[in-house]
Image (cartoon, helix red, strand yellow):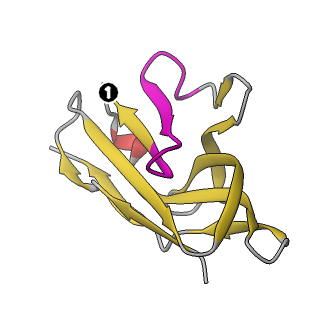
Amino acid sequence: QVRLVESGGGLVQPGGSLRLSCEASGSIFSIKSMGWFRRAPGKERELVASQTSGGPPIYDDSAKGRFTISRDDAKKTVYLQMNDLKPEDTAVYYCSAVLTSSSGYVLKHWGQGTQVTVSS
């Protein structure tokens, strides 16, 4: 059984910062990619940032210059540093990972999400 557990969400003032963390655990053989998605009120889920093993990070245009994705493969953890947060960043943020389980299956897994609210 594979689990992704997010942490670091909360309430922050406009212009503030948050750092999200997501740790993968369970019967994992290898991780191909990890990333962050978000669903804002009234909108569809969208990609925020992702990073495939051996490749460069990919960002949505709204996140470029403000957000930074990083991975600690030894800890099976992905981070999202969010700076200069704006009210439009308010959303539920979901961690995702494409990985191979110990039994050989390649699947995309999702965390349960963490709420980020940017408001004064």
Question: In the orientation shown, which residue stands out farthest toward the bottom?
Answer: 1
Q: Residue 84: image x %, image y %?
A: 30, 25
Tell me: residue 7, above or below residue 54.
below
SS label for mark 1: loop
Q: Residue 79: image x %, image y %?
A: 42, 42
Residue 22 image-quadrant placement = bottom left
Q: Is residue 27 left or right of residue 100?
A: left
Tell me: residue 27, above or below residue 1.
above
Q: 110 and 47: which one is in front? A: 110
Q: Residue 46: image x %, image y %?
A: 66, 50
In the picture, which quadrant includes the N terminus?
bottom right
Residue at the spot 48% in from the left edge and 45% down from the top edge: 74
Q: 10 and 25: which one is in front? A: 25
Q: Amino acid at mark 1?
A: Asn
Q: 74 and 45: which one is in front? A: 74
Query: In this picture, which residue range is highlighted in magenta?
Result: 62-78
Total labels drawn: 1
For disc 1, the marked residue is 83
Q: Residue 95: image x %, image y %?
A: 53, 58
Whether 25 is among the magenta residues is: no
Residue at the spot 36% in from the left edge and 33% down from the top edge: 82
Q: Is residue 91 left or right of residue 8?
A: right
Q: Is residue 67 left or right of residue 101?
A: left
Tell me: residue 91, above or below residue 74.
below
Q: Is residue 102 left or right of residue 34?
A: right
Residue at the spot 49% in from the left edge and 32% down from the top edge: 70
Crowd rating for badge 1 (residues with CA inside 10 Å; few <14, some 14–19, many 20+): some
